[in-house]
Image (cartoon, grey):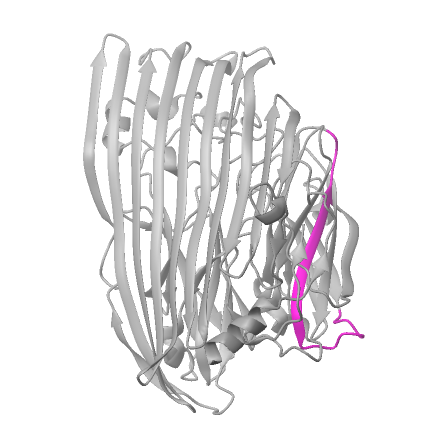
Amino acid sequence: MLFGLVIGTALAATAGIAGSQPMNQLSVEPRVPRLAQTPCVVELFRDVRIDNSSDAGLFREFEYAPPANCPGPWAKVILSVDLTGPGTTDVINITISLADQRRNLDWATELFVGGAQFNAGQSRWRVERDVTDYSALMRTARPGYLMQTDGYFRDACGCVSGHATARLIFYPVIAAQAPPAVPDAVYPAHDYGAFVFSPALPRNIERAYLDVYAQQPQPWFSCVPPSAALNFPLLVSTPLALGDYADPGLGDPQGCAGTGYRDVVVLIDGQPAGVAPVYPWLNSDLNLHFERTVDVPVPTPQSINLLPFRVDLTPFAAILSNGADHAISFQFADGETLMSGPFVRGQLLLYLDHGSTQVSGQVTRNSLVGTNVQQTYLRNQWQAQADTVTGDVLREFRRRFQIAGYVNTSRGRIATTVTQDQLLTSAQLIRLVGITSLPNHAYAQNLDLDSATNRTTLRELGGTVLALDRERFHYPLQIDWEAAGGTTPTAGSRLDHGSAYVVQGHHNQSSYYRPSGSYATRLYANFAGGRVFDGQGGYTSWQGARSHYFYDNMGSCFRERVTWVRDAVTAHTQGVGCPGDVNRLRGFAHPDGSPDSMGWWRMSYRPGFTAR
């Protein structure tokens, strides 16, 4: 009976009928589902200029105050951002964060990382995030920051300026609802070395999570084996390989040597505590001389809305609660070494034990300590004949670990076990014609990458299972790239011909068991597109498709697909394949694939859907 009651209240999601138009004409990302009750809206800033031309364009401070008519707690909080720019083909990337009374950027917590990709078909873009889990930040007035971050990502010249408007949308808890269970405290944790929490964190932490944003703009996934780069230096000195690295003093060489693997290791006080896989995010320019290679007019997955990966640090809850200062740091791992990265941001989310002022416990197992990524070369075959070198490379990277710990709370001992298995395979076929001719040569690379992370989290109180979560994160990427051109001391580098075809996906499958029932989701976001550049500004074979499908076991169904030929959309469909060919989303759903804390599970809902 209890199972039926809980599922019944969860199924009875609040309703808010949205417009039938897509959020963006040139993308398929879903809106964050609305609730039925009337929200309160707080504007953070309006039409703020963002560019690289001045400090004012790079960095803007604003003041946030909670909504007077919706004092909280809130059933849901949505961040909605509008980015407006020129009708030309350009990109802008930003972060939006909330700080504290110190007015120190180091203590600012990101709510959004992403941007817009302007072109003639769309000069205004909207992006949204469900930020309900960050409600603790929004209960009091505080400063906030808008930053332009193209230097981390792309278009470091800052040649384009745009304007940004952002608002927070608060849905109050109504009589038929219980408020969602949200973190009691939220702290930033950035990549400035070891980020020390001083004064100390609360001493009654029951659960802890870290949302990790991490990217390396250069195409790490295309790196050739170091031995090949040593034997054939043109592989990493050619301007024709994948890359968007500009250094006039070096003749803008592209390509790289390395393992072709990345993840981010999270450390607590210098000890490994968790791992976040890195999404193979695509720069708009796959090559410095082939701008906006395949993502015009429609961007690739996560291009305009970079999603965090949530790392479960609950096995360390007792350590974080011991009253000492603790440091969280990040290191990129490439399968062989640990290194710093150009862009890592973290947000620490803490759930407290309200029945006690001090918890105790310990970490009972941490197999991540002292273990490295297992790297296996299944093939690494290179042949040179006359002026041509060909390579056939197949590498496999595997990381497995288990971390367990317990915390003694006012309810009893709660034990948490996190088991994670990561497997990345990378296949490369490479052909370089003219291995001794920097002025005139040709380069081709066929890349097939498959990154899969499986994670199981078990939380128990005595002999009772409180939660059993199984999650799979799948990031496939295929790139077929060909280029011809070269470099001369007087004329510099040039691209005479370029051809690119990209297939990329962001796939999530999740199941969440609670004593009163289960919730399951599936997400498939896919991109396939290509374009040929003739060196004179002309393009052929310019077409593609982008789709976004989301389902859950409580009736949510979202399907949107757009196709294009050249820079014109040929079709944009919504709901086709869902019941009645209509998109319907429960108010608690996370159709964009962002982390779901399941805090809504304890809520009661009025009947209905959010419909698209």
Residue 284 seen from this side:
no
Residue 71 counted in the magenta span: yes
Residue 246, image x, y percentages: 51, 29
Residue 382, image x, y percentages: 21, 22
| Residue at 42% in and 10% down | 439
Please say if 298 is above or below 373.
Answer: above
Residue 520, image x, y percentages: 45, 60
Residue 141 counted in the magenta span: no
Q: Nearer the viewer, residue 556 or 291?
A: 556
| Residue at 58% in and 49% down | 579
Residue 421, image x, y percentages: 29, 56
Q: Is residue 196 left or right of residue 270?
A: right
Q: Is residue 284 left or right of residue 469?
A: right
Q: Nearer the viewer, residue 242 or 75?
A: 75
Q: Which corner quadrant of the image does residue 394 belong to?
A: top left
> Over which residues does the magenta segment extend?
65-87
Please say if 328 is above or below 538.
Answer: below
